[in-house]
């Protein structure tokens, strides 16, 4: 028996094939294109997601051989908040606005003013990143597309529609929409009605572990898979990543450092705190929620500074940072290249280097970027720790986890032991496969064991006081330059 996990990411689609012991038999990654026509705008054609899955599965089929044809179930993970608007024929009416598209800031503010109880019910203050603000922006700025919309789905749901014909979503993607009553796990009518969405436009709600449909015969033939196999509802990439790590119990946490960054802690009750910049969302597994510090700017900041300085070899640049010796840097970096969610909820926040002089080079800039992202994660940790104790060493996944130097900086800045799980690069796709296993009849306990540790990273205790002092300076940056950054973002 084998199981297939699909992770529809922002910049890449990943597919893995595992056996019933969850050993990875084959894996494939296909890059995805993002359209960014102007600062703050980030879009993707939903059919890009299906094209990525097709190509990833073709590569998987070639690599895995007969094991590919023994698949029992498919699970799905997908980037959150990016709504696909479909017409009567189930075709997209316009590109999807991605999670890091910030054009809906004014619409988010109006939702906060006009919909009483929205923050308590949906688990977070309205923000431009979430689907509700994006839908309101489309209604006001692309009325023809809004009028043609008959169904709203999220990234992994659009892929599942193609696989099965089923219109559905899970609680975690619904949670990221700001259209969802978190406590009662149902659609939140006040926001739906405010946006002018009829009840039939929003899909059926199911747990991520449910079988949401069966693989269609024609699609199965096209993909070389057995027809009629179970396709799990799946979930958003953040909670499905937690499933891939076995983080489904209260107090368990993890950090994902990808294009953006998230710091997640699982809860067994719904306990939002609207006064801070945390998100409280339903998990993709039954009877669980999670709190999350969500940063829009993660490893993308390092890619940006490398491209700016024409450094095409990121691993080599990171080795040069490590060779220069321990930090902290004499430069501070505010990593808000695409606005920010936690803790500031400011789509117009902008980045900054502070402390530059004529002797600074790309290595200095790169170290400052690594530290700036780590400081941003520490702000999230400080908020999370006020809500619930964070237990044990924290696993680190995502592209940033591949850098030992960055992991050491983060452990020291956070003052916490970190661990790199085995197969960390497959966490979301593995979590998706695990959801498929439960949809095929496995128990959650059997399908979701704890991760194995590949590497442990301890803080540099001698450097902690130095980083504490630098962190205090970092916290003063945003209030000091906020008005300048917002003026620049607004074109003033």
Image: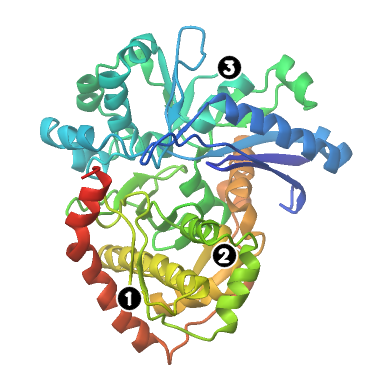
Q: Nearer the viewer, residue 105 or 154?
A: 105
**Is 379 drawn above or below residue 132 in the view shown?**
below
How far separated are the C-alphas under marks 2 and 1? Answer: 27 Å
Earlier in the chain: of badge 2 and badge 1, it is: 1
Q: Secondary structure at mark 3?
A: loop
Pair 2/3: label in front: 2
Earlier in the chain: of badge 2 and badge 3, it is: 3
Residue 179 locus on image (x, y percent): 30, 30
Look at the image and tell me in which quarter the N terminus lies.
top right
Mark yes or no: residue 10 visible.
yes
Residue 370 locus on image (x, y percent): 46, 69
CB under 8 Å between callouts 2 and 1? no
The dot on residue 401 is: 2
Q: How many residues crowd mark 3 within 10 Å: few (<14), some (14–19), many (20+)?
A: some
Residue at horizontal 44 percent and vertical 56 percent from the top = 261
Residue at horizontal 81 percent and vertical 36 percent from the top = 61
Q: Nearer the viewer, residue 342 or 229?
A: 342
Which residue is most to the top? 88
Pair 2/1: label in front: 1
The dot on residue 165 is: 3
CB under 8 Å between callouts 1 and 3? no
Numbered label tally: 3
Q: How many residues crowd mark 2 within 10 Å: few (<14), some (14–19), many (20+)?
A: many
Look at the image and tell me in which quarter the C terminus lies.
top left
**Is 229 drawn above or below residue 106 in the view shown?**
above
Mark yes or no: residue 276 visible.
no
Reading the image, the residue beneath label 1 is 355
CB under 8 Å between callouts 2 and 3? no
Q: Quadrant of residue 6?
A: top right
Residue at horizontal 67 percent and vertical 22 percent from the top = 215
How far separated are the C-alphas under marks 2 and 3? Answer: 37 Å
């Amino acid at each position: 028996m084998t199981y297939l996990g699909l992770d529809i990411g922002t910049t890449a689609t990943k597919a893995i094939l595992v056996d019933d012991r969850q050993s990875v038999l084959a894996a494939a990654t296909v890059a995805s294109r993002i359209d960014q026509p102007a600062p703050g705008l980030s879009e993707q054609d939903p059919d890009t997601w299906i094209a990525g899955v097709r190509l990833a599965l073709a590569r998987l089929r070639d690599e895995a051989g007969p094991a590919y044809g023994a698949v029992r179930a498919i699970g799905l993970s997908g980037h959150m908040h990016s709504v696909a608007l479909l017409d009567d024929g189930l075709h997209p009416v316009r590109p999807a606005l991605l999670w890091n598209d910030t054009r809906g800031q004014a619409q988010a503010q109006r939702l906060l003013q006009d919909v009483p109880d929205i923050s308590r019910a949906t688990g977070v203050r309205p923000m431009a990143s979430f689907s509700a603000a994006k839908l309101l922006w489309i209604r006001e700025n692309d009325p023809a597309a809004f009028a043609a919309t008959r169904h709203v789905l999220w990234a992994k749901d659009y892929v599942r529609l193609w696989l099965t014909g089923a219109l559905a979503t899970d609680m975690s993607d619904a949670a990221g929409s700001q259209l969802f009553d978190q406590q009662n796990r149902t659609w939140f009518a006040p926001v739906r009605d405010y946006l002018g969405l009829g009840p039939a436009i929003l899909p059926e709600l199911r747990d991520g572990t449910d079988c949401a449909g069966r693989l269609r015969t024609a699609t199965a033939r096209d993909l070389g898979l057995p027809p009629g196999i179970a396709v799990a509802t799946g979930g958003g990439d953040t909670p499905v990543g937690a499933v891939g790590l076995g983080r489904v119990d209260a107090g368990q946490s993890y950090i994902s450092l990808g294009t953006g960054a998230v710091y997640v802690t699982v809860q067994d009750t719904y306990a939002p705190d609207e006064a801070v910049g945390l998100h409280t969302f339903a998990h993709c597994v039954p009877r669980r929620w999670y709190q999350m510090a969500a940063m829009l700017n993660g490893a993308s900041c390092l890619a940006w500074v490398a491209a700016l300085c024409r450094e095409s070899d990121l691993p080599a640049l990171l080795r040069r940072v490590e060779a220069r010796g321990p930090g902290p840097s004499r430069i501070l970096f505010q990593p808000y290249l695409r606005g920010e969610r936690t803790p500031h909820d400011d789509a117009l926040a902008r980045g900054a280097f502070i402390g530059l002089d004529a002797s600074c080079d790309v290595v200095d800039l790169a170290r400052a970027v690594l530290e700036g992202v780590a400081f941003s994660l520490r702000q999230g940790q400080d908020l999370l720790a006020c809500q619930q104790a964070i237990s044990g060493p924290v696993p680190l996944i995502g592209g940033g986890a591949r850098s030992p130097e960055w992991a050491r900086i983060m452990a020291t800045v956070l003052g916490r032991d970190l661990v790199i799980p085995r197969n960390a690069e497959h966490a979301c796709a593995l979590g998706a496969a695990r959801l498929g296993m439960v949809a095929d009849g496995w128990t959650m306990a059997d399908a979701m064991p704890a991760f194995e540790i590949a590497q442990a990273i301890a803080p540099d205790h001698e450097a902690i006081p130095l980083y504490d002092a630098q962190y205090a300076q970092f916290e003063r940056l945003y209030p000091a330059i906020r008005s300048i950054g917002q003026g620049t973002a607004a074109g003033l």
